[in-house]
Image: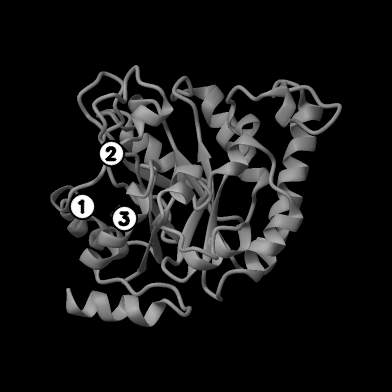
Amino acid sequence: MGDILVGTCSWTDPALTRSGWYPAGKRDAEGRLRHYAERFPVVEVDSSYYALPSERNSRLWVERTPDGFVFDVKAFSLLTGHPTRSAAMPEGLPADARDPGVLDEVWSRFTAALTPLRRAGRLGSVLLQFPPWFRPGARAETVLEQTARRCRGWPLAVEFRHASWWREGQAEATCALLARYGMAAVAVDMPQDFAGAVPPVTPVTTPRLSVVRFHGRSAAWEGGDKEERYRHAYGDGELAEWVPRLHELAGQAEQVHVLFNNCCGDAAVRAAERMARLLGTVPAAGPGAAAERAATAGS
């Protein structure tokens, strides 16, 4: 049976800091991460999608977290074909993913930034979240092949935002494609009452890793702004629906990463805490671990 690691898709969200979840004296950059890592064994680095991470930050993340804690790092927007702000690009480089030289340079910098995490064995995965217009076909297969070649040996997780990847008649080919490159399929929990909804399928495409991301079930997902789309407080019943499915995934993969992306106030950390209790998982090592174990045992 594989390990199930539960966490959230950010520990730096301003709304989380304002929520009061971080105690006084632990609201600076170092204090937030240390406090978070006492309570969860995994976190997704979401900021790396908006700006290239740095080697310095990666070193600090390793220093500020206990052994065994892992980081899932979201790929920089340009690397997965999303629109990218010019201000987010390295100086002198245009935000043009069609230019092979630009793409090579950005991949080089992204790779260098992750080196401290990889050397310390703390890179849980690189999350490749492709945009809604990235659909099955020859071009997409080429992109996946090229990405796998650039990231050879890395743990990779792929989230498709176009539902056609998992529809009947295509899902088997999608699984085979990801398995070919050793990429973990990302399962999602999201609203299902609109045409573009990605179904909550849970294929395992590599024995190394399975990832589930909980985006919330907001009625404003289609047409709402970012805050409205992710504003959702999971109830115990909604979480309990996933418990047998997560145990089933753990029977097929060495690790299962369960990440809450309903980052509005403290909704994500509270959902993650409740999910960990429902699963009976043990939190990361640290000063807060004993109390959390006792709470879990008594629930």
Residue 41 placement: quadrant = bottom left
**Helix, strand or loop at disc 1?**
helix
- Circle 1 crowding by C-alpha within 10 Å: few under 14, some 14–19, many from 20: some
Dot 1 or dot 2, earlier in sequence: 2
Can you tell which mark lies on residue 232? 2
**Helix, strand or loop at disc 2?**
loop
> Is residue 55 visible to the viewer in this orientation of the structure?
yes
> Is residue 184 visible to the viewer in this orientation of the structure?
no
Q: Quadrant of the N terminus?
A: bottom left
Q: Nearest the camera: 54 or 78?
A: 54
Can you tell which mark lies on residue 239? 1
Residue under circle 3?
Answer: 270
Q: Position of residue 132 (x, y in %)?
A: 44, 23
Image point 52% across, 73% down: which residue?
68
- Circle 3 crowding by C-alpha within 10 Å: few under 14, some 14–19, many from 20: some
User: Is the C-beta separation of discs 3 and 1 under 8 Å?
Assistant: no
**Helix, strand or loop at disc 3?**
helix
Image point 24% across, 63% down: which residue?
247
Q: Nearest the camera: 100 or 108?
A: 108
| Badge 1 amino acid | Leu
Q: Nearest the camera: 289 or 93?
A: 289
Task: Determine whether, in the image, residue 119 is placed left or right of residue 228.
Answer: right
In the rendered image of this protein, does residue 18 appear above or below residue 130?
A: below
Residue 215 placement: quadrant = top left
| Badge 3 amino acid | Arg
